[in-house]
Image (cartoon, rainbow, N blue to C red):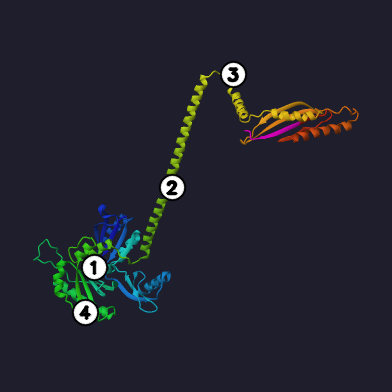
């Protein structure tokens, strides 16, 4: 975003633009002349076209007009919102509603209440200022600030350590056909006045052509001396300057004009004069040195180099500036959010690419393994069994290999029980070995026993009831003997009926075998 610096005088509006320079940093740059617009309809139209071409630029306006007003006031010691409310009411009461107002802290009263002293400054609406501000408002320009040369004076004086030994200072500078007089007390702005000068400078024919043409004439130098005395009496009458105090006057001029000024400005009557070399001041701030005592260009370049904290405020123009700042902040947030989304998408893309590469590698390994399997299978003789039947058979073999249990111990225990149970006869035994599906350490043996109970020979065939009870008792005694075996569970599937037939399921759990 480009920065344009506007200098408004009684005759025209001068525009400087800052060009970014690679070797001078991003903030500092080279100020170039972008044109000058006179106070005329043509000049306003040309400036409006310039605003249309630079809608995304920031503008800094330096107003050097005589329509200024300064007034000192005292308010109670307040902070925050209450202080802002009091300042707004004071400005509304003292100045016009269309004026650009500013409150500058001056200090505090020495007392128990600690009242705050303020200097209220305002740029009053005028025919030289209002048309340009209306153009800025209608174009929606981002006006970074509105300043005036008096706001630059305290920093200029403090830069040369003047305020350390001087309590009351008056800075004189020549503007375009006017004299700027700025009074500071203890390094703080207290008053300023712009006096028009009807006397013009003249060219000295005795000087070579290589010297700057602008030089102060003796008449203009005498006018400066007279205006200084007049302002000294005014400050005394307004009680801004005590009568017993000495007023230190600092004249900002070119070294070529020191001779003309020394002859008319003499010390005395509470006045002491000092000369500030404008070329040394420009070298101190690293800005181009002016070729004459006119400070218009110097003030504008000083504003571009080090803008003061105090500035005049306009509600509409400040709104444009605030909206521009919020838009830039929103754009920055969106840019950060987009960058985070892009980073997250890049991470996800890299992860997905890694998974795809891994999947492709596994697919290639599977294809190579299948190819090797086909090659190995082709090298062997064909089996007499189909592959669909071979796979379950090998799985059963692995299962039996993991749990190699035999029915030998199971049948030994069953034979011992049957030796004592003469009435029980076994017809069939179906034995199987099973392993747990979760891969545990326990294996189970199951056997389904089918048989019948042979009734006792001493009982009569007609004694049916007695025979049924004997069969039931024999089966109960037989199942109890089986349950007494270690790890044995008995489940009765069928009880004896007319043929005394029974069916049992025996389950034994064997630990430690897998």
Which residue is the site of mark 4? 270
Which residue is the site of mark 2? 341
Return the disc, 2 or 4, that comes first in the chain's sequence.
4
Which residue is the site of mark 3? 384
In 3D space, how far apart are the residues under numbered discs 4 and 3 (Cα atoms)?
132 Å
**Callout 4 crowding tier (Cα within 10 Å): few <14, some 14–19, many ≥20:** few
Q: Are marks 4 and 3 in contact (CB under 8 Å)?
A: no
Q: Are marks 2 and 4 in contact (CB under 8 Å)?
A: no
Quarter holding the N terminus is bottom left
513 in the magenta segment: yes
In 3D space, how far apart are the residues under numbered discs 3 and 1 (Cα atoms)?
112 Å
Return the disc, 2 or 1, that comes first in the chain's sequence.
1
Q: Is residue 282 left or right of residue 381?
A: left
Q: Are marks 3 and 2 in contact (CB under 8 Å)?
A: no
Q: Nearer the viewer, residue 42 or 51?
A: 51
Nearer to us of marks 4 and 3 is 3
Q: Is residue 59 left or right of residue 298?
A: right
Quadrant of res 436: top right
Q: Is residue 87 left or right of residue 377?
A: left
In 3D space, how far apart are the residues under numbered discs 2 and 4 (Cα atoms)?
71 Å
Q: Nearer the viewer, residue 381 or 342?
A: 381
Which residue is the site of mark 1? 160
In 3D space, how far apart are the residues under numbered discs 3 and 2 (Cα atoms)?
62 Å
- Residue 513 percent coordinates (x, y): 63, 33
- Residue 201 percent coordinates (x, y): 16, 68
* Element under disc 1: loop
**Callout 1 crowding tier (Cα within 10 Å): few <14, some 14–19, many ≥20:** few
* Element under disc 3: loop
Return the disc, 4 or 3, that comes first in the chain's sequence.
4
Q: Is residue 418 left or right of residue 337?
A: right
* Element under disc 4: loop
- Residue 69 percent coordinates (x, y): 30, 73
């Amino acid at each position: 975003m480009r920065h344009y610096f506007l200098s408004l005088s009684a005759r025209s509006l001068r525009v400087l633009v800052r060009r970014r320079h690679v070797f001078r940093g991003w903030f500092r740059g080279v100020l170039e002349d972008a044109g000058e617009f006179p106070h005329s309809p043509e000049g306003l139209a040309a400036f409006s076209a310039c605003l249309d071409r630079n809608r995304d630029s920031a503008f800094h306006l330096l107003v050097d007009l005589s329509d200024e007003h300064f007034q000192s006031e005292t308010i109670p010691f307040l902070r925050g919102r209450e202080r802002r409310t009091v300042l707004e009411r004071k400005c509304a009461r003292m100045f016009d509603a269309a004026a650009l107002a500013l409150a500058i802290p001056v200090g505090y009263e020495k007392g128990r209440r600690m009242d705050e002293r303020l200097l209220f400054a305002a740029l009053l609406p005028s025919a030289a200022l209002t048309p340009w501000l209306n153009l800025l408002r209608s174009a929606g320009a981002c006006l970074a600030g509105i300043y005036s040369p008096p706001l630059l004076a305290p920093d200029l004086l403090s830069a040369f350590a003047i305020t350390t030994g001087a309590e009351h200072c008056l800075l004189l500078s020549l503007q375009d056909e006017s004299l700027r007089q700025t009074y500071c007390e203890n390094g703080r702005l207290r008053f300023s006045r712009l006096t028009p000068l009807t006397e013009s400078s003249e060219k000295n024919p005795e000087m070579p052509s290589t010297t700057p043409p602008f030089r102060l004439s003796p008449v203009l130098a005498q006018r400066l001396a007279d205006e200084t005395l007049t302002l000294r009496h005014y400050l005394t009458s307004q009680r801004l300057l005590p009568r017993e105090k000495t007023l230190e006057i600092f004249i900002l001029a070119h070294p070529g004009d020191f001779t003309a000024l020394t002859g008319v400005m003499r010390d005395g009557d509470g006045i002491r004069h000092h000369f500030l070399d404008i070329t040394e001041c420009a070298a101190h701030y690293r800005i181009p040195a002016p070729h004459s005592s006119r400070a218009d260009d110097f003030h504008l370049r000083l504003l571009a180099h080090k803008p003061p904290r105090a500035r005049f405020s306009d509600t509409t123009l400040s709104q444009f500036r605030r909206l521009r700042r919020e838009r830039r902040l929103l754009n920055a947030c969106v840019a950060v959010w987009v960058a985070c989304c892009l980073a997250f998408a890049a991470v996800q893309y890299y992860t997905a690419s890694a998974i795809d590469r891994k999947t492709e590698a596994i697919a290639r390994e599977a294809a190579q393994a299948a190819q090797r399997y086909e090659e190995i299978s082709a090298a062997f003789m064909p089996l007499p069994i189909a592959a669909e039947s071979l796979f379950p058979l090998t799985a059963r073999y692995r299962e039996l290999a993991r749990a190699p249990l035999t029915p030998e111990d199971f049948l030994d225990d069953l034979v011992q029980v049957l030796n004592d149970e003469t009435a029980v006869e076994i017809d069939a035994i179906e034995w199987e070995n099973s392993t747990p599906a979760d891969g545990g350490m326990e294996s189970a043996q199951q056997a389904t026993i089918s048989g019948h109970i042979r009734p006792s020979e001493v009982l009569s065939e007609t004694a049916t009831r007695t025979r049924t009870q004997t069969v039931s008792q024999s089966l109960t005694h037989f199942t109890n003997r089986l349950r007494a075996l270690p790890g044995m569970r008995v489940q009765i599937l069928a009880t004896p009926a007319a043929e005394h037939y029974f069916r049992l399921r025996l389950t034994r759990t064997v630990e430690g075998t897998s």
